[in-house]
Amino acid sequence: MKLRPLLAPWLALALAAAAPAALAHAVITATSLQEQPVKPKSPAHVALFFNSNIEFKLSKVQLVSKGDVHSPLNIKPGKKRGELLIDLPGLEEGEYVIKYKVFAADGHLTDDQLRFRVAP
């Protein structure tokens, strides 16, 4: 009895089961803005938490402010796996959007945005 005909269906099943994990993108699991999307004063930084490691050198974050002004922001790794810290400048009262493009360690891109407001 040859094993090859019996092995092929099992191999195909194993590959199909592993595919979703291999194709997964970095998913944001929490942010420091979730608890309070309206800030009484300008936060010094925002933390984003992802379900996978992030390639910081390949990732970019921008702040979009009034008048559709885009400003690049500095990012750095946090203390936890998948934590991204974004340094913010002093912000005046108003609405802001943080646009981020992050690369997961597996090479997949996650492109999204967060909205928040600074109001006394």
Image (cartoon, rainbow, N blue to C red):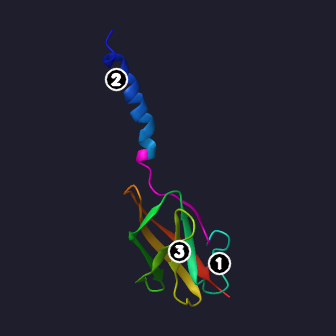
Sequence-earlier tag: 1 or 2: 2
Residue 30 placement: quadrant: bottom right
Question: Residue placed at 32% from the left, 17% from the top?
Answer: 5
Question: Residue placed at 57% from the left, 85% from the top?
Answer: 94
The residue beneath circle 3 is: 85
Question: Residue placed at 52% from the left, 88% from the top?
Answer: 89
Residue 26 placement (x, y as % from top left): 47, 58
Q: Which mark is residue 8?
A: 2
Tell us which disc is closer to us: 3 or 1: 3
Sequence-earlier tag: 3 or 1: 1
Relative to residue 87, is residue 10 drawn left or right? Answer: left
- Residue 117 vs 78, above or below: the answer is below
Toward the viewer: 44 or 4?
4
Question: Residue placed at 54% from the left, 62% from the top?
Answer: 81
Toward the viewer: 3 or 107?
3
The residue beneath circle 1 is: 38
* 47 is within the stretch colored magenta: no
Instruction: Estimate how packed mark 3 is, as few (under 14), some (14 to 19) or many (20 or more) residues with alpha carbons within 10 Å.
Output: some
* Three-letter amino acid code of the residue under disc 1: Val
Q: Compute the Cα span from label 3 to label 1.
A: 19 Å
Specify the quadrant that holds the C terminus: bottom right
Q: Which residues make up the magenta segment?
A: 22-32
- Residue 12 vs 47, above or below: the answer is above
Q: Compute the Cα span from label 3 to label 2.
A: 46 Å
Residue 32 placement (x, y as % from top left): 62, 71
Q: Helix, strand or loop at disc 2?
A: helix
Q: Which mark is residue 12?
A: none
Q: Helix, strand or loop at disc 1?
A: strand
Instruction: Estimate how packed mark 1 is, as few (under 14), some (14 to 19) or many (20 or more) residues with alpha carbons within 10 Å.
Output: some
* Three-letter amino acid code of the residue under disc 2: Ala
Q: Helix, strand or loop at disc 3?
A: strand
Residue 36 placement (x, y as % from top left): 67, 74
